[in-house]
Image (tube, coloured by chain):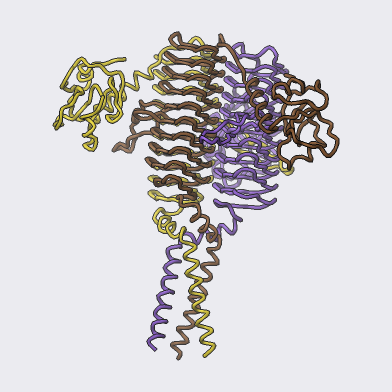
Chain colours: A yellow, B purple, C brown
Amino acid sequence: MEFSARQIADVLEGTVEGNPEVKISKLAKIEEAEAGSLSFLANPKYTSFIYSTKASIVIVNDDFIPEQPISSTLIRVNDAYSAFARLLELYNQIRNEKKGVSSLAFISPSAKIGQDVYIGEYAYVGENVVIGDKSRIFPQVYLGDNVQIGKETIIYPGVIIYSDNKIGNQCTLHGGVVIGADGFGFAPQQDKNYKKVAQIGNVIIEDNVEIGSNTTIDRATLGSTIIRKGVKLDNLIQVAHNVEIGENTVIAAQTGISGSVKVGKNCMIAGQVGLAGHLAIGDDVKIGAQAGISGNIKDGAIVLGSPAIDISVFRRAIVHFKNLPVIVKRIEEIEKMIKRGESSDREL
Amino acid sequence: MEFSARQIADVLEGTVEGNPEVKISKLAKIEEAEAGSLSFLANPKYTSFIYSTKASIVIVNDDFIPEQPISSTLIRVNDAYSAFARLLELYNQIRNEKKGVSSLAFISPSAKIGQDVYIGEYAYVGENVVIGDKSRIFPQVYLGDNVQIGKETIIYPGVIIYSDNKIGNQCTLHGGVVIGADGFGFAPQQDKNYKKVAQIGNVIIEDNVEIGSNTTIDRATLGSTIIRKGVKLDNLIQVAHNVEIGENTVIAAQTGISGSVKVGKNCMIAGQVGLAGHLAIGDDVKIGAQAGISGNIKDGAIVLGSPAIDISVFRRAIVHFKNLPVIVKRIEEIEKMIKRGESSDREL
Amino acid sequence: MEFSARQIADVLEGTVEGNPEVKISKLAKIEEAEAGSLSFLANPKYTSFIYSTKASIVIVNDDFIPEQPISSTLIRVNDAYSAFARLLELYNQIRNEKKGVSSLAFISPSAKIGQDVYIGEYAYVGENVVIGDKSRIFPQVYLGDNVQIGKETIIYPGVIIYSDNKIGNQCTLHGGVVIGADGFGFAPQQDKNYKKVAQIGNVIIEDNVEIGSNTTIDRATLGSTIIRKGVKLDNLIQVAHNVEIGENTVIAAQTGISGSVKVGKNCMIAGQVGLAGHLAIGDDVKIGAQAGISGNIKDGAIVLGSPAIDISVFRRAIVHFKNLPVIVKRIEEIEKMIKRGESSDREL
């Protein structure tokens, strides 16, 4: 795909300064751009790069005044950053555009497939599955019986959705995600065996949720594991059975949430955090990386450490941790001094 | 699937109180049940819900005496909890019932497939693979050459089992599990490159083992990585080469076990624990969440922390951690006092 | 596959002592070997096993002098360990040898497939994909549009490579690896929603890289996430967008690297380590297990702890951590003593 400066300026409602026929086929950072790339200048810190960049086209703000000659063609717009972000999105849309239902996919006769749906090769679509309009099911995806997929949702290759689970509209599930495997429930027996507790609930994922690669979300024992609208989960996250994650909460990679935890709205949870079972985490909570959460957390709290405590308390304490040898030394000195004092007292 | 109160009472050997023809199609908690659901009342804490529940049928203990009118049909049984658990299992069996060998699966001519085996679409069954009676191989599973699968074992979609590995009877492997990839073994070379050490051992998984989604178990360098009977592994766990995990040990999500570790029987290991290489962990050991294990652990020990120590020692120590600033302050006060004492001594 | 002692001695340029026609079909440790196995003796600690081993053949050093009768056939070579390692490799090569392009794979007409390439069943090869000579693409692999795979590279089953990513020569990607999913980038909006930032960069993996099962490497927002030549990544590792990992760096399982981190050459990073975003980690750095890295690290540093500090400082401090209750007790004693002293002063 190649586009000329003139074509791009038309899309962005900008003006061309330089050769309007120069063509680009990719987008790049101004400091890394090669010939045939389009870049942008928004942050003044990067201004120096515009005089040496090999980008064929650079988008700049209307008020940019060059101080040296520039070899790239410029496109002047109102807001260079927004214009570039818009091009990123267009590029991304074109790149991932896939159409039609492959004859190499398996689709149960009872499945209901919406308008303009893409279903790739070797995908498996079970009985009574419903897929909404304009959704894209990539190759090698598994949709178990009765799975429901909303509209304009993207399911990338290798995603596995067990039976009876529901995915909302405009969701994105990345490669290798597993939705609705059995929760980890076993009842100890007298002979030290464990007996499996049947897990017959499901997973409900509301609209506008994004889930990163190889993340796992288990089905509820009874009822539903629920991911509310707008939640963003990074890669390799574990969400156990009967968990509920509130609206617009964002969770970074490799965090694990134990069974029946309820996480509030608008929380930010960093990477490699662990939450013990059956906890209630309030709204607007922030949890620092590698924290271990073993108790409920109130709205708006910011915590760190394992076990986690208020972040400012943690930070004040941790500076002393590495000084523990010195602290102990100081105590020894004091004890010696007192001993000397006592013995001299005695001598008196 | 719909069942009437009469049919369910027959299965459970219970007695119907109310309309025996009312039908249900799902199971639900008493506080969440909608019309068309069956629920149960066992824990007295939930008794109040039985007067307002929308469940069409509620299973209750024989000795339950209502104090208000109840709109649901009741089924009286000896033990409501056990009866409900039995229904859960029946429901689960019906739900996952799949039969036959798909014509869209690839099955090597040399593979030996038992009676009543299910093999789903796009599954790959390599040379000399053996699959025991009544096992179910879901779509998109990979079984490498010489893999052996026991009887009544379930391999969910997207599971990858490399060649030469053995899975026992009545095991369950969830979506995205990878069994028998190469152990992480590299020999450092003089030019700072690493040379791969060939990993030609295998993985042996004994009977009645369950393995959670996206968990990885590497093949041994030589010999076998062994998961003993009754072991339960949660999601996203890492088991390195030549590890052995003893009978009935249970491990929660995201824990990692380094190469050649031997874990005993009946252990409980919480989530996000890390075990360093070549350790011996005794029987009946309990390891708390996020612990870091860097030494051997004796039978029956309970440990926590990174590096892990006895749990009661850890708990007594951690309460002081957040007070470190106060502790240091107290030392400073003492030092000042002593200084004042000394100087007043000198003044004397 | 069976081989006689004579055949093996020929390959290894060794001499047979015993029955040259005895046959073996597997390789095993000397202490575990059964009849029909070949083993080796290199470490003198294991010498006692050679008199009781059931191995049919044992490779020994030329200068080995038995002190008791040995029932196994011996093959004498210059260096028993190297000879055995060579057999391991040969065995591994034969075991994984797969040939030809399956008629059950989907290959876009625009894809360019090299000489002697293996492509397994249900693999998906997108538009303009390039696969180098002698590379092996196992069943159920996904190669998105424009993916480039070098020569002699192995892509195991279930690996997902999104469009536009590049894999070098002689790389090995294990089952369930996901390369090039979108980086975790979202811009917070005023209504507490998040707006996705399009991720249009890619992933570049240089030559001789090995990546463990279910590891995830995200594509760059713009530009490339880069894994330099000789890097070895274990299982279940997270590599975020725009990360760069330097030559010959080795990383153990379940470690997570946040966005835009630059890791140097020849580093060793243990398991379950977390690195915060935008950090610079020097060359030859060693990071201990479960460490949390929140600042830049200089060349050659060795760190541990969360937050990580110099390893010797950490080790000196942690020994005091479990004694905190005793430390506090000692302070209390001192305070009491001083109080007594003061009150006796006052009494004076």
Q: Position of residue B159 (x, y in %)?
A: 59, 25
Instruction: Tell me if C120 is positioned left or right of A85 in this view.
Output: right
Q: Position of residue A280 (x, y in %)?
A: 47, 46
The part of the image, by quadrant, that contains residue C184 is: top left
Q: Residue at x 67, y 43 (%)?
A: B263
Q: Residue at x 52, y 33 (%)?
A: B193
Q: Decide which of C335, B164 is in the foreground and name it.
A: B164
Image position of C121 with respect to C328: above or below = above
Image position of B81 with respect to A62: above or below = below
The part of the image, by quadrant, that contains residue C213 is: top right
Instruction: Tell me if C84 is positioned left or right of A92 in this view.
Output: right
Instruction: Tell me if A66 is positioned left or right of A28 in this view.
Output: left
- Residue that extends furthest to the right in the rendered view of this protein: C69
Quarter of the image that includes the N terminus of chain A: top left
Q: Position of residue C208 (x, y in %)?
A: 50, 27
Q: Position of residue A14 (x, y in %)?
A: 18, 23
Is residue C63 visible to us here? yes
Q: Decide which of B348, B261 is in the foreground and name it.
A: B348
Q: Decide which of B69, C36 is in the foreground and name it.
A: C36
Is residue B76 visible to us here? no
